[in-house]
Amino acid sequence: MSSTPLPMSPPNLTPQLMNLPSSQQRGICIAHRRFLGAFPRLLNGLFMGFKKRNHHDIVQPPAPLAVPSSPASPTTSGTTRHSHPGEEYVSGQGRDQFDALRVTIESLPDDVLLDISYSYQRGPYGYLPYRWRILVRVCQRWRCIVFAFPHRLDLRLECNAKTAVRKTLDVWPSLPIVVRDRWTRKWPVLFGDNIIAALERHHRMCGIELHHLPCPLFEQLLRVMDVPFPVLTLLDLDLGDKSVPAPMLPDTFLGGSAPRLQHLALSGIPFPTLPKFLQSSHDLVEIRLTRIPNTGYISSKSMATALSAMSKLEVLEIGFESPAARPERNAIPSTRVVLPSLTQLDFHGNSEYFEDLVTGIDTPSIRFVKTEFFNQLVFDNPQFLQFVGRTKMLGSFKRAILSFGKSMAKFSFDNRRPSAAKSEAYLHIHILCDALDWQVSGLTQIFVQFSTFLSNVDRCGVRWTKKTRPLEDDMDHTQWLELFLPFTSVQTLGIRSKLDSLISPALNELTGDRVMEVLPALHTLSVYGKKSLYEPFITARQLSNHPVILE
């Protein structure tokens, strides 16, 4: 297990510590720092001793742990023998450089133990909700400290379908409740009753995460969720049953409002009155509405209006289940809704809906945009282009990746440098269709509209995402030339081997005066397949005094 990073400075000295000698103050501060690193294994040792002693309420603290205190003693070499769990962490190399001082856990004041408990509760990978139950079983003092600061330690009671709520939940203090589970066919009927019993404590419910819910169980949950949930901050519901029409969320859902809600995710669930519901949720940080059925259609204008008061919103995802939900094209609004904190926008549906949505919003901090458009004959998205142009981050991209697959064409547009681990911003455009020539045609139409931004791209890659090669049908080779035409500044082009037989004939057609019509700035061609397929193109570029290096 990875240990929690040690703090750079000792804890604040309380009056209790100030009255101690300076050597003991120094020893307690060092113990505080090293206990943070030793805590996971130390607790393991405590519980091993707990099992051996068969105690049920109180666990005696281990023998004193050696802690260095003064730099007066000479250094000694060799391995120190440790007789207590966790002591090998506290007594590290160089311990004999200091005067001997032994500090027990009981010597640490309450605020230091609280700091240690907080670090252990957060963990190296974020909040771990179950760890506080380990702390309260160590001894009576620790139990009192943990329960005395429930907000500081962010204490919650985690429930799932297997939790016997009516028997066990009331044993603990009145802490906020989080119910989280994923339905499977192995669930007995009793498991659904446990979830309902937890939701009945609506005044304490702070988080709900239920995935793959069947419609009968979901209808039962709605009956107990028509009352206010005053402390609810997280709501994540996923309806997994696609064989029957999804139940519609009523106006009385959650009492009609959720003022403290911060994260909202609905998948496959129609909620046509969502704009009215959102008017009371000004603290929302994340909204994810995916697989919206036709019965839950919300117009882009209503959606933009509902978002107008959400100054804290950072993530917005809207996805429709089918292409049948086509909007009526609205006039360009005179004023736009400003979402100052929005950094990520994901969309799945018709390009017309997205066009109308971005017409009415401004996102000055946007960094990540991902769109998945259903296939159509004509892509006309001038407002999408202006939306990107209003954002500085999205207008500085240098790299493009074109990916073609069995059912989707992807275009990734980012500013990632070759040595960087990830991109600071990106723009992804997906087109959902099967035929390769339709994929190329759709991306070509979008590239023509984005030609202003594509002129800044200096690196481009083309690949086929499936293991099998694409079918070599009667696709016109000139479609590839039209696809590459807007990339006037690309210096490096990479082509995966599975597309060599389709792209190389198109490039080889560029001879004589036409050789510089496409990719005029190309300097390096990286081929992952047969390089001999591109020799006519390489020769033509050399004859034009614009040679290309073939890698």
Image: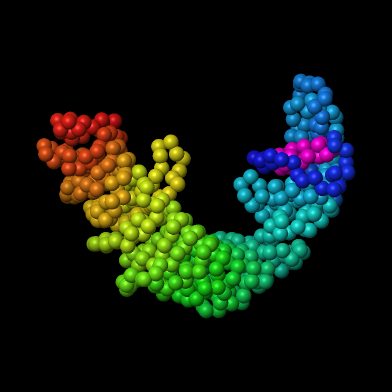
**x and y percentages locating residue 541 in the rendered image:** 18, 33
Label the magenta part by its dominant secondary structure.
helix
Q: Residue at x 77, y 55 (%)?
A: 146
Quadrant that contains the C terminus: top left
Is residue 338 among what the camera can see?
yes
**x and y percentages locating residue 437 in the rendered image:** 23, 52
Please, is residue 172 above or below residue 118 in the view?
A: below
**x and y percentages locating residue 469 in the rendered image:** 28, 44
Q: For this view, does 514 lie left or right of residue 143?
A: left
Q: For this view, does 32 lie left or right of residue 283?
A: right
Quadrant that contains the N terminus: top right
Q: Residue at x 51, y 62 (%)?
A: 313
Over which residues does the magenta segment extend? 24-45
Q: For this view, does 213 lie left or right of residue 501?
A: right
The foreground one among 385 and 82 is 385
Please, is residue 267 above or below residue 23 in the view?
A: below
Q: Residue at x 81, y 39 (%)?
A: 28
**x and y percentages locating residue 242 in the rendered image:** 44, 67
The foreground one among 87 and 15 is 15
